[in-house]
Image (cartoon, grey):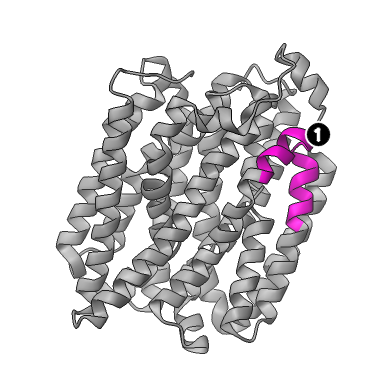
Amino acid sequence: MENYILPKRQAISVFFVFAFGYFISCLLRAITATLSPVLTSEFNLLAADLGLLAGGYFLGFACMQIPLGYLLDKYGPKKIVTSFLLIALIGIISFALAKSFSGLLISRILIGVGVSACLMAPLTGYRIWYAENQQQRANSWMLMVASLGFLSSTLPVQLLLPSFGWRWIFGGIALLTFLSILLILLFIPNWNFNKNRILENSDKTGSLSDVWKNRFFISVIPMGLFNYGGLMAIQTLWAGPWMIRVSGYTPLESATGLFWINVTMLISFFLWGYFLPKINSIGFSATRILKLGLPVGFLVMLTIIILGPKAGAFHITMFILSSIFLSVTQPAVGLSFAGHSAGKALTSFNLLIFAGTFVMQWLMGFVIDIVKTLGHSEIFAFKSAFSVFLILSIISYIFFLVLNKKNYEIKQ
């Protein structure tokens, strides 16, 4: 992997240290899907409560994205991610000790705030420290790490539950978070903002309004909210309940299904990251990949809705796999701006994703409860919630096509 601004060995160590922190972030993000049966039972949660609890992570996460962009551009990844992880550590410990739903929710929001820098800090660093032709690859391999975190939140957590209980599992995650803070302090380079500006021959700092007025950024706003947000809502929460309440899986079978879903995604993101620079080199820009690839996911989701109880882990895996094309959006946004604005651009799009995830997790739970209240079956309620997601995704895709109809292309 040539052309690093950092020496190759240091660049690799930076990637692995950041990846460890992001692994913890994704483990925490998805763990509610596996713990949903025990939390529902212990705290008497409704579907909307469960959606709100899982979404609390994304609410805290989303609230920090705009200030995080300014902080990252000014102070750099090392200072910011270590400071934020201390907040996450407090949230993790308080979640483990919570005695009520409100205690769980507040702790979950704190966790979201604390891990909100775990992807944006690396991507901001990569924008400066890594060669431009490695940006998409680094992003895809971070998503591979995300899949490893999601994977670890499934069957391993389910197998540990009988012996340790969910509270002690969170105690173990707290220890991993503390280790991540130490590694970041030891191995991540300090941020020299003046040097970074000189490297780009620019004395500008960029403004947030420049980001939100950018044509490509505008075109992906609905996509970030609904397509990406809904995908993550399903992957990190509603895939588990679908398998249990619609497909008839046991909690262990559901956790096993989630495990293999994330094994598939881990392998897929590794291969996608490896081949993506080659795909770009033969003329497939991010815009073109999105135009051609997203309809595949729509067809798979429609199949899941039609099949209902016959759609299990395999079909959900195919949907998440067919949505891999969305992964090019975030680094594409970063590459649309100069390095001095990378933090603001990346965190602005991340705000859309995680605000969308919060909204979609809650909205899908709300639809399920409303449809059941109207006297329909739970299966029909879940199919209705997934249909709402599909409709919003298609509308967002059409918006993207309209704004890019003149073959507007981003910088690669």
Q: Residue 220 lies in what quarter of the image?
A: top left
Front one among 209 and 20: 209
Residue at 50 percent of width and 37 percent of height: 140
Q: Is residue 373 above or below residue 183?
A: below
152 part of magenta stretch:
no
- The kind of secondary structure element at disc 1 is loop
Side (left or right) of 179 relative to 386: right
Q: Residue shown at 53%/53% (left/top)?
A: 148
Taking the image as drawn, is residue 29 in sight?
Answer: yes
- On the question of residue 247 being in view, the answer is no
Q: In this view, does 265 lie above or below 332?
A: below
Tell me if residue 68 is in the magenta stretch. Answer: yes
The residue sitting at 45% across, 34% down in the picture is: 329
Q: Is residue 217 above or below residue 349?
A: above
**Which percent across, then down, holds residue 249?**
31, 75
Task: Give the side of residue 102 with respect to residue 144, left or right.
Answer: right
Marks counted in the figure total 1
The image quadrant of residue 232 is: bottom left
Residue 323 percent location from the top left of the image? 34, 44
Q: Residues within 10 Å of mark 1 (few under 14, many from 20)?
A: some
Q: Which SS type dominates the magenta stretch?
A: helix
- The residue singled out by tag 1 in the image is 189
Q: Is residue 63 left or right of residue 218?
A: right
- Please indicate whether residue 314 sits to the left or right of residue 8 in the image: left
Inspect the image, locate mark 1, and give the three-letter code of the amino acid beneath it.
Answer: Pro
Q: Position of residue 409 (x, y in %)?
A: 40, 19
Quadrant in which the N terminus is drawn: top right
Residues rendered magenta in the picture = 67-85
- Residue at the spot 42% in from the left edge and 69% down from the top edge: 255
